[in-house]
Image (spheres, helix red, strand yellow):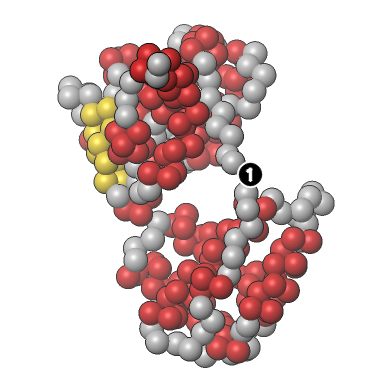
Amino acid sequence: MKISDAVYTFLSYAEITKNQSPKTLENYTRYLKLFLSFFGEDREIEAMTLADIEQYRIFLYRREDKHGKRLAIKTQNYYLIAIRSLLKYLVRHDKDVMAPDKIELAKVAPRVVDFLNREELERLFAAISLEKKIGRRDRAMIECLYSTGLRVSELCSLNRDQVDLIRKEFGVMGKGSKLRIVFLSDRATQYISEYLKTREDNYSPLFTSLSNRSKKIIDITGKGEMFRMTRDAVEKIVQKYRKIAGIIKNVTPHTLRHTFATEILRNGADIRSVQEMLGHSSITTTQIYTHVTHGQLREIHKKFHK
C-alpha cells in the first residue's frame, strides 16, 4: 500500500469514523504531510522499517522553523505520535506494517504550569475599563474563562442559548466530542448578563467581534457566525490587558484555565473532580496541577506523621 493512500484513508477514518475535532484533523494533516514529503508518496508503507524512522527522527531533530529555531522535543514527538496513530490504524485493518510501539518518544522535561496569583488576577480584571461596550464584552469573556476553565476554542464556540444564566451552568463539547458541565461564578454571571444587555442583535454567538460589525460586513446566514470571536482575537485581548495591568509573566487564555484549576485544587477540590471540570480524558493530564497541593501534603504529613 502506498504511503499516500495509507495517509488518505487514515485521515478519512479520523474525520468520519472517529469524528475527530477540526483541530486534531488539522494537526494530523500537517504532521503526516511532512512524513509524506520525507519518505515519498509512492513508497510502500509495508517496506518502512525502524531504521527509516530513526532517519526521520534525525531529520526532525535538525529541522528548523522560519525563525531558524529547531523544533522543540515535544513538537518532534507530536510528529512521531501521528505516525504511530497511522500504523495502529493499519494494524487494526490487517496491514503488514511495522509495529507502532517500536517508535519510542523522546523524554520531555516535566511541564511547568503558569498561573496567576490572586493579586495578579485582580489586576488583570481591574485593567478592563467598563465605560464602553467592548470593555464589558472583554470583562465578561475573561471572567467566563476564569470561572469555567474553558479552553479558548470552547469559549469561542459558545452560543447565547447554550448558557443558562439562571442555573449558572452549561454543557460544553470538548476534545474528543466529550460533553461536560461547567459552572459560572456569581461574578461571571453578572458580567455576562451586563454584557448581553448591551447587545442590540440576536446573533447566536455568545461573544461577538465589534470590529467586524463596524466594517458593515453582510451576514447572509442571519446568525452572526461571521462575527463570532476567534481564538487569535481572544488571545490578543488577554495580552492587551496583561500589558495594561503591568503583569510581567506571559498571560494567555490557557493561563486562566491553569489559574482556575490551581485555585480549586488549593481550596480543597480533589484531582478527579478537577479532571471532570477541565474535560481531561486522562487523569495523567490533570496531574500537572498537583504541584499546588504540595503545601497541603506537607501539613498532612506534619499532622499525622509522628
Image quadrant where residue 269 sits:
top left
Q: Residue at x 53, y 66 (%)?
A: 82
Tag 1 residue: 109
Residue placed at 43% from the left, 81% from the top? 91
Q: Quadrant of residue 302?
A: top left
Residue neighbourhood size for the residue with mark 1, other residues' Cα within 10 Å, grouped as few (<14), some (14–19), many (≥20): few
Res 213 seen here: no
Q: Is residue 299 above or below residue 172?
A: above
- In this orientation, does residue 269 appear? yes
Q: The C terminus appears in which quarter of the rendering?
A: top left
Question: In the figure, 80 relative to 233: above or below?
Answer: below
* SS for callout 1: loop
User: Residue visible at 42% across and 75% down?
Assistant: 89
Left or right: 106 as drawn, with respect to 198: right
Work out which residue is located at the far left of the displayed protein and give it. 167
Q: Is residue 266 left or right of residue 27?
A: left
Q: Quadrant of residue 168?
A: top left
**Horizontal relation, residue 72 to residue 112: left or right:** right
Residue 59 location (% of width, % of height): 75, 67
Q: Is residue 83 above or below residue 245?
A: below
Number of marks: 1
The x, y position of residue 45, in whole percent, is 57, 85
Near-viewer residue (215 or 14): 14
Which kind of residue does numbered mark 1 sit on? Ala
Name the residue located 67 percent from the left edge and 82 percent from the top edge.
40
Q: Is residue 45 above or below residue 211?
A: below
Report x, y in % for residue 254: 50, 34
Residue furthest front as drawn: 306
* Residue 105 spot, x, y in % from top left: 60, 61
Q: Is residue 203 left or right of residue 77?
A: left
